[in-house]
Image (spheres, coloured by chain):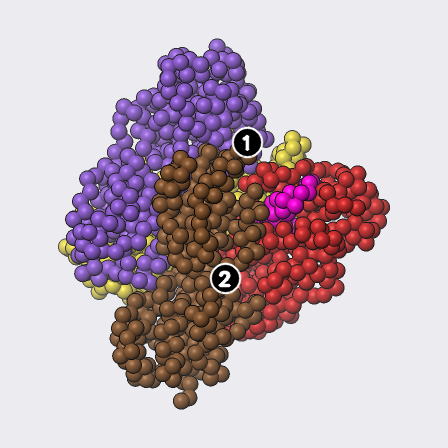
Chain colours: A purple, B brown, C red, D yellow
Amino acid sequence: MELKRIGILTSGGDAPGMNAAIRAATRCAIYKGLEVIGIRRGFEGLLEGDVVPLTSRSVGGIIHRGGTILRTARSERFKKPEGQVEALDRLKKLDLQGLILIGGEGTFKGAWALYKKGFPVVGIPGTIDNDVAGTDVTIGFDTAVNTALEAVRKLRDTASSHDRLFIVEVMGRNSGFLASMVALASGAEYVLVPEIPSDIEKLCDKLYNARRQGKTHSLIVVAEGVMSAQDLALRLKDTAGYEARVTVLGHIQRGGSPTAFDTVLASRMGACAVEALVEGKSGVMTAVQKDEMATPPLSVAWEEKKPLSADLLSLMDMLSI
Amino acid sequence: MELKRIGILTSGGDAPGMNAAIRAATRCAIYKGLEVIGIRRGFEGLLEGDVVPLTSRSVGGIIHRGGTILRTARSERFKKPEGQVEALDRLKKLDLQGLILIGGEGTFKGAWALYKKGFPVVGIPGTIDNDVAGTDVTIGFDTAVNTALEAVRKLRDTASSHDRLFIVEVMGRNSGFLASMVALASGAEYVLVPEIPSDIEKLCDKLYNARRQGKTHSLIVVAEGVMSAQDLALRLKDTAGYEARVTVLGHIQRGGSPTAFDTVLASRMGACAVEALVEGKSGVMTAVQKDEMATPPLSVAWEEKKPLSADLLSLMDMLSI
Amino acid sequence: MELKRIGILTSGGDAPGMNAAIRAATRCAIYKGLEVIGIRRGFEGLLEGDVVPLTSRSVGGIIHRGGTILRTARSERFKKPEGQVEALDRLKKLDLQGLILIGGEGTFKGAWALYKKGFPVVGIPGTIDNDVAGTDVTIGFDTAVNTALEAVRKLRDTASSHDRLFIVEVMGRNSGFLASMVALASGAEYVLVPEIPSDIEKLCDKLYNARRQGKTHSLIVVAEGVMSAQDLALRLKDTAGYEARVTVLGHIQRGGSPTAFDTVLASRMGACAVEALVEGKSGVMTAVQKDEMATPPLSVAWEEKKPLSADLLSLMDMLSI
Amino acid sequence: MELKRIGILTSGGDAPGMNAAIRAATRCAIYKGLEVIGIRRGFEGLLEGDVVPLTSRSVGGIIHRGGTILRTARSERFKKPEGQVEALDRLKKLDLQGLILIGGEGTFKGAWALYKKGFPVVGIPGTIDNDVAGTDVTIGFDTAVNTALEAVRKLRDTASSHDRLFIVEVMGRNSGFLASMVALASGAEYVLVPEIPSDIEKLCDKLYNARRQGKTHSLIVVAEGVMSAQDLALRLKDTAGYEARVTVLGHIQRGGSPTAFDTVLASRMGACAVEALVEGKSGVMTAVQKDEMATPPLSVAWEEKKPLSADLLSLMDMLSI
């Protein structure tokens, strides 16, 4: 099956930089003599045949845009075996010989199903959570960290005008990459992540000691997967009478123009995915490992658990004195 | 009592631009041959004599800083008649013949008490809520609107990637100035403000009709004084089964560098306040009325209620089709 | 001639907020039962009949975008009488009974020519220069000031690390509105504007005195109409041996998302322009005068000269001590 | 000589993140039981004994600030052997047993001189140019790239409103790291870097072909070390009649709050430098190599030449079609 025409889709939660990856994959494929089809709304759009041709011009002016021009959607149908057979059928009717899928673990599992049925697929890790094992970084993480950091820095202004305690809830249902980076970069005093059991009494003790040593304001970053900022505020009040102000960043963290890092990462990964397909690889993802491009199997994403950096957490402890 | 030395304090919630007002008042006073004393932590600091001399150099490099270098604090003592007598005493001991107070309605009521006792005071309206009658604008409002707007614009990116409903909670316990400006400027579909009774069923009908007409995503801005974003989300779910994503901006809205508008407004008001004291005025605030500087009595702030612009609200209705 | 269908075009230099004005005019016109046609590339596109229908949906998602979706272009043909006759002809062939033109003085002169020939026109002042007499503010000015201010604030960081002199060149061929607002808001020590003759020797004296009084770094804002930053740097070196670092902001000042102020201003002006056409007005512009909407004749734009605020300039002098 | 007390200085051009490195080194040293002295204005301040004690509190609130609280300055005296002897003498009088120096190649050569005389030194690479061999990244580079990128993105708005050609001059006297990253991340069509000979005729051919293929606007990024943007504009005009608009970012690129990446990098390097001194290392720099911390000899900085990534340049070529 000669490679002449490939498809691209985005699936799951969107992340800044996805458009830069779409642009890079499209232009790189065209550069190598391939045609490119954009599949809209992820697996759902694939099942419905909701497609649009992609050209060098049609991906112009999107490199800096947040979100994804191909949109994403959930697909219950694709989760079932029949749906996957149907999807395979649709890929053939569309005359595609390869598919690039941009998203997180869920997207990669879907890609894996197609790969197992013999269809050439390459995944590109795009999620603000950075919780994809196999790659050191994912597209969108750097942008989300900076977006949250900018928000937290604004709290610092008002915090130092008063004697205050702030709680900021950031994204991260199962992982604390975002929370810990935001905490370290903002100089937050405390961070609560899903990977480490929370001890509210110990947190209250720390707050108490910090006040006694002259800290007039404190900042706590909490990943949504631990508890909501509102719940944490209630628990601090119940335990030690502290009054905390609450910010919930929510989906703001998914938006905005990608940073330079994410734009370049997405561009490299988009080109790398096309090259992998051209070289006949399948069932792999584009990855950065120790600062170099790699193409590990997609299955690493769910077979391994990517750990938080213990170094960074202990650094944070040392620097928040 | 010849004017030779004046004090400046900030009180209540801080607002971006307060530092620019402190700088302008200080340099203008020095230009006019006066000495300037900064009183830290508002009325509480006044009672404690917590002061710092302000010079042209010491207010250098603060024009763009959020928060207030003089800090603010609540003072229960000053609310009592004895506290106010004590404060007057302290002002005399500090050899001050005039006082500039930057803050909102609560600050102005405190200033009024000193004025009633014969001490020369001028208020500068600084609050992100813009809810001070007597002046068309307050310091910090333009910055807070832009800060919230930037956040909401990031939601748009991700909103258009999915079919989604977002709720953003902004500040405003008793007034909807911030909420309505953010809604209008962001192109939000709906806004809930304290001045207008909320009708959740009607809101659900509107959402339903918008979807039918092809709107794939909607944004609701709600002022905290109406209800929390979390409560609104629950009510939308109960009433019509809608799933909404929630963002609570919180004190982020108070932070950040002041916009050009707020910086210039603060500079003009700082200079105007000094001029008012020099001209022997007291019990007044600096104000902008129809784009010109004015000095109405402080009491206007609580004797009148500043209305939302009906024009802007009906404009929003028309433009969100 | 009953009003059923109107056209919108943007002409001259683009300004942030033009898209918000296009959206508001379009939606307001549709709300009032009119059809709307977008004319691309200004008068040149009008002559070529380069048009696109505008609907509520097609102007969705543009409120925050810089530039103009209708683009602009120069037209030598339209400047000649024959071109104007041709344009009139084209307007009739397009079955338009009214035209909204967004731009500066040049655009308004073109609109005036059509008005003189009996075609209903309303102008909307959109230019970052704010140099349109008849309105206190133009769309894009507030955004450009804030864009330049953010850039200048970054210079402050590095300026205070060294002992340094910086020159920033901002836009403004014939007017100093942008330069003077940026200078005032950034706390710049000096500003050179076209309205006031420059005295380089006096500037050098001021720099010298400031250094002697302990100022370790200074910032000069110069409008491009006075001289280039590079030329100013050479003259400072020749006159007094000062070494200055140069920044030329260029067209960056035209870009970026419009501020809340510009977005709301553009929305109000877009709606106001439609209302003016509906009420049978022609040959007028939408304007803000003392904070209220007005519709003065277009000709005010070139018959009067809008002065810089002397108050703001003297305030700057006082505050840069 | 037991390590009890260390000094920190910043030298050369400032870079965003230097303050985060000062904070991290100070707090880490205190955590390890050391005292910390800040030396102001680099080697010049060292010779003059211009010092300030640094404590956990005194480095609070600086993590996000651009510039350097310790300031920098040039020192002609330190370049001479006598000056270096004097500096050594001063270090002993200050009772310091170790010195951390933050800066670029020039700073490291100064550090090397002290190391050769037996004084324990560790360098931290801080420069927006990223041109220090031995480390993959330097503090400030990521921030400068993002600052320039934001500026260039604003040009895109106005570029797509007109048919236009823009030139942006970025920093980089001897290296094109900044220029090439900005070009790649912004989707610029062309980049001129000092490492590769420029061919203006070929550039004009490319511009001509792009226009013929329907590109309506183009962006050229040029490193200052190649030629000034103004000169490039003249040459494009002379060679092919192109009219280009010019932006010179200048020292804006040194300012602004550090990005999350730079803040975390600076924090890690600050801590790593203290650990290196504690472990008895000297004459080394803190470095990131393949995403891991390392401490190569300072001399690598001038003995090796750090190459531009050929991969990134060819990627840019492929993606700008």
**From what the image shows, is residue A305 above or below residue D69?**
above
Q: Position of residue B316 (x, y in %)?
A: 55, 49
Q: Nearer the viewer, residue B272 or D299?
A: B272
Q: Nearer the viewer, mark 2 or mark 1?
A: 2
- Give the magenta part as a residue range: C13-38
Do the residues marked 2 and 1 share a common chain? no
Residue lying farthest right?
C82
Q: Is residue B180 visible?
A: yes
Q: Position of residue B247 (x, y in %)?
A: 38, 45
Residue lying farthest top?
A1
Image disc number at residue A59: 1
- The answer to whether B127 appears left or right of A237 in the picture is right
Q: Is residue D76 visible?
A: no
Q: Secondary structure at mark 1?
A: loop
Give me the residue at 36% from left, 55% from top: B251
- The answer to whether D144 appears left or right of A313 in the picture is right
- Image mark 2: chain: B
Give me the residue at 74% from left, 53% from top: C280
Identified by mark 2, the residue type is: Pro
Image disc number at residue B307: 2
Please check the rendered image and state whether residue C149 is part of the magenta-colored stretch, yes or no: no
Give me the residue at 44% from left, 80% from top: B282
- The answer to whether C293 appears left or right of A36 in the picture is right
Please check the rendered image and state whether residue C18 is part of the magenta-colored stretch, yes or no: yes
Displayed quadrant of residue A258:
top left
Q: Position of residue A136 (x, y in %)?
A: 33, 33
Indicate the quadrant containing the C terminus of chain A: top left, top right, bottom left or bottom right: bottom left
Identified by mark 1, the residue type is: Val
